[in-house]
Image: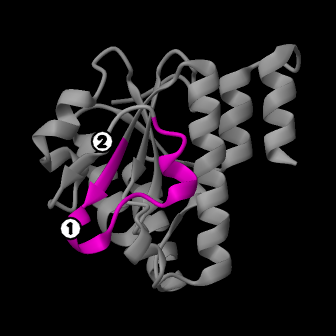
């Protein structure tokens, strides 16, 4: 499917924060993980402020623990539990996907497993997929780089937190702009 725009729209987007869980986060490079949590937090706060639909998933929470506290405090509905790598293979995830939102924004971990498989499956369903590069992580940076290249080649839009948030905002005025500007600093 060809899209006339490669720009994220607040009215067309749905955010998916994938598997940012305590035990999995503990085995990631520390500085990179802190940046991913910060950027996922910004994305969730922007989604809450701008009424962008979102889904948070947890991969086998009995083993990998709950969503990290910094993000758990921002979510307004329980995470979707899954054991599949691709979120799309989990029926509960699909029930939470909003049909009238043609764009899905992906953030979380791990880039080369759950993010990659979810992105490829979403593309196969006709969704336009935005992958927030500074809000995804893998234990091995080479695996993340490979996943990004595969997703780009498959047709995903690779973006970053700040670009995405300001695309959602669209204008440099109002309370939402002021709040987002403070978050980005």
Is residue 65 in the magenta section?
Answer: yes
Asked whether residue 131 is in view, the answer is no
Is residue 181 in the magenta section?
Answer: no
Q: Secondary structure at mark 1?
A: helix
Judged left or right of residue 102, residue 36 is right
The residue that disc 2 covers is 123
The residue that disc 1 covers is 62
In the picture, residue 127 is in which quadrant? Answer: top left
Judged left or right of residue 31, residue 60 is left
Q: Nearer the viewer, mark 1 or mark 2?
A: 1
Position of the N terminus, as image quadrant, is top left
Q: Camera-side residue: 173 or 101?
A: 173
Asked whether residue 148 is in view, the answer is yes
Q: Which residues are magenta?
A: 56-75
Protein image colouring: one colour
Q: Which residue is drawn at the image coordinates 36% and 33% (left, top)?
A: 77
Q: Position of residue 63 (x, y in %)?
A: 23, 74
Q: Secondary structure at mark 2?
A: helix
Mark found first going from the N terminus, 1 or 2: 1
Q: Is residue 4 above or below residue 63?
A: above
């Amino acid at each position: 499917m060809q899209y006339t725009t490669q720009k994220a729209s607040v009215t067309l987007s749905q955010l998916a924060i994938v598997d940012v869980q305590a035990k999995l986060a503990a085995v990631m490079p520390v500085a990179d993980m802190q940046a991913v949590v910060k950027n996922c937090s910004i994305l969730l706060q922007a989604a809450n402020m701008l009424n962008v639909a979102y889904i948070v998933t947890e991969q086998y929470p009995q083993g990998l623990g709950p969503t990290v506290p910094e993000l758990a405090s921002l979510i307004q509905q329980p995470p979707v539990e899954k054991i599949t790598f691709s979120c799309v293979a989990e029926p509960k995830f699909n029930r939470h996907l909003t049909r009238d939102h043609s764009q899905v924004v992906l953030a979380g971990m791990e880039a080369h497993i759950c993010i990659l498989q979810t992105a490829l499956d979403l593309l196969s369903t006709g969704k336009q997929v935005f992958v927030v590069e500074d809000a995804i992580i893998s234990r091995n940076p080479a695996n993340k780089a490979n996943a990004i290249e595969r997703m780009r080649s498959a047709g995903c839009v690779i973006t970053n937190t700040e670009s995405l948030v300001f695309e959602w905002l669209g204008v440099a005025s109002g309370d939402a702009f002021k709040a987002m500007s403070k978050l980005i600093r």
